[in-house]
Every structure is written in structure tokens, then in C-alpha cells.
Amino acid sequence: MSHVAPRRHRPADRRRFVVAAGVALLAIVTVVLCVIALTQFRGEPSAGQIRATTSSPTPTVTPTSDPTEGPTSPQVALVAPKRLLSAFDGTNVYRATVAACPDSRTSFELSDDGGVTWQTSDVAGSTGSSAALNLTAGSRDFVHMVTLATDDCAPQYLRSFVGGIEWQVFDADLPVTWFFDAADPSTLNSPDGVRSTPCTTVWMAATGSRAAVLCSDSTIFTTTDAATSWSEPISVPNAAAIGVSPSGYRVALLNAEGCTGIQLGELVDGDLSGLGACLPVEAAQADVAVATAADGATFVWAGDIFSGSPNGGATW
């Protein structure tokens, strides 16, 4: 039996062992540190991450009005008047109704005592007129109108040389005559031809080359060049009707300034003068007409009353 001598560990072997153990330990420590780092990275999310992952879409809220605010009253749009009025002086006055074509007929009346008494003229029967568009007293005896013909509702020019007692159709003067048809509020006829209105117009007052239009929103525009150009809008709340005056335009205001009825002001160069005396009357806006003669005599036809003023409505 042979004898095997025990193996002795040499110094070089011991060093290799120590190096290997150190490398293994370093690897273990590295793995542990990586695990710890990953654990921290995947740990509890930040507040920003919570909001991003757990928030739900914000619902759209439809704004509502302040419950303390009362309802807003819409502005009442003006409508075309149903009456026409013209005066030559303080005694000779003419009036007509605005009818619907072709169903209704124009009625015409004349007065030679300032509206105390009236005489009726059969303008509709003699001329086939269904609706009056304008009425102008050129003198004590000469009166002219533009009406719509009953048969085709086309405009026609009527004239009278006997104060409106008898009439004749004379369309040669129609192209150079001011008239406005409320059925077409975007245009009017001027002495220079058809022109556009500056607003939704309900009525017009005109003479010579100047005119004023009353708009559905209670504004007024004026022109001095036969509607080739227009002024800036002039706001006139409570305006019900307009008419030509010697120096500008007479404006009838309905239920303004504490007056239950009509007050008159004069519009000159864009400014409305102070209102005159209150003429008590209950009337709809469409049932108001105003006219001023060359001598300053002014008349109002509103509701059930007809009244005159020698001073533009300062007194009645």
C-alpha cells in the first residue's frame, strides 16, 4: 500500500482564491444595489403621476345667467305707418290711409279749416289705387300722391289741381318723385332714381334733394344729395313717425319723457331739439302721422285724435 502525502497550499493559490472571492462579492453587491434602485424607481408614484393617471375628464358646463338678473326686454321693432298726412298751411290739410295691395283701397280726405271738418274724395275709384305710398301738398290746390295700382300693384303717380277733389294718373313724373314702399325696405325711389336705404326702413320723409328715413330700430338717417350718401345713424328712442319741416324734420315721439301720448321734436343737422308739449292720446306706433306746413303750422293724426299746433308742437 502506497502512502500519499497531504497537499500543501501554496501562497499563489491563496491569492487566487482571495481575488475570486472579492470579485464574487462585488458582483453580489452590484446586483443588490441594482435591485434596490429598481425598487425605488418603481415605487410609489409622485403627485404629478397620480394626477395624470387617476384624473377623469372635466365635464363641460354650460354657463347660466345670473339668477339675480331680471329678463331683458327685447327692443320692439318699428313698423310702417298706416297713415299719411300733408299740410300746405294752417288751414289746408290732406290725409290718406296706407292700404294693402290689392285687397284694400286708398281713402283720401281734405280739409280747408285746419282739420275741423273733412271732405272725402274717391281717389281709389277714379284711379284704381289700392295703396298710398306718399302724399304731398305742393300748393293750396295742387296735391300729388304715389299709389299702387289695383291691377298689378305697380307704383303710379297721381296728381290733382283742385285740392284732391279729382285725380288723374300722370306717370311721366313717377321716376323723379320720392316714394318708398314698406314691402321693400331696402330701396327707395329718389329724384335721381332707385337708391339703397341705409337700414331696414319703415318710412321716409322727403322734399327736394333731401330726405330722412326712419328705421325699424328707432334710428334715423338723413341725406342731402337724393340718397346718394347718408348721414351717420341718429338714435331716437320712442320715435313713431317723421315729416319734413322747413329747416329739418319733425319727429313724433310716442310715450316718451313721462308723456302718455305724442311729443314733437325737430331734427336739424343730426340734433333733436327739446320736446314740446304733451298731446295726450292712446295710439299704436303705426297709427301716428305728423306734418308741418311751410308756415310752421304742424298737425298730428294719432289714434282717435287730430290736432294742430301753430308752433311745431310747443303748444296744442
Image: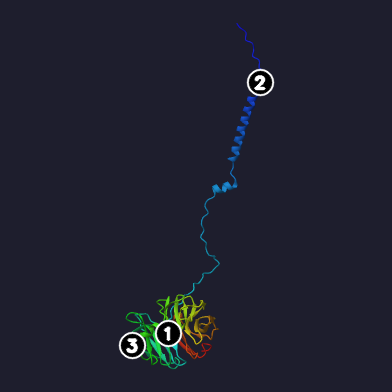
Q: Which residue is mark 1?
A: 84
Q: Residue at the spot x=63%, y=30% of the render?
A: 26
Q: Which residue is mark 3?
A: 126
Q: Is residue 183 above or below residue 161?
A: above
x, y percent for residue 48: 58, 48
Q: Is residue 246 left or right of residue 37?
A: left
Residue 14 is tagged as: 2
Mark 3 crowdedness (10 Å alpha carbons): few <14, some 14-19, many ≥20? few
Q: N-terminal of the two: label 3 or label 2?
A: 2
Specify the quadrant of the image occupied by residue 95. Answer: bottom left
Q: Is residue 20 left or right of residue 225?
A: right
Q: Inspect the image, locate mark 2, and give the three-letter code of the amino acid beneath it.
A: Arg
Mark 2 falls on what kind of element?
helix
Mark 3 or 2, which is nearer the eye?
A: 2
268 or 150, which is in the foreground? 268
What's the CA distance linking mark 3 and mark 2?
Answer: 143 Å
| Residue 85 seen by the camera | yes
**The furthest residue to the left:** 151
Specify the quadrant of the image occupied by residue 31. Answer: top right
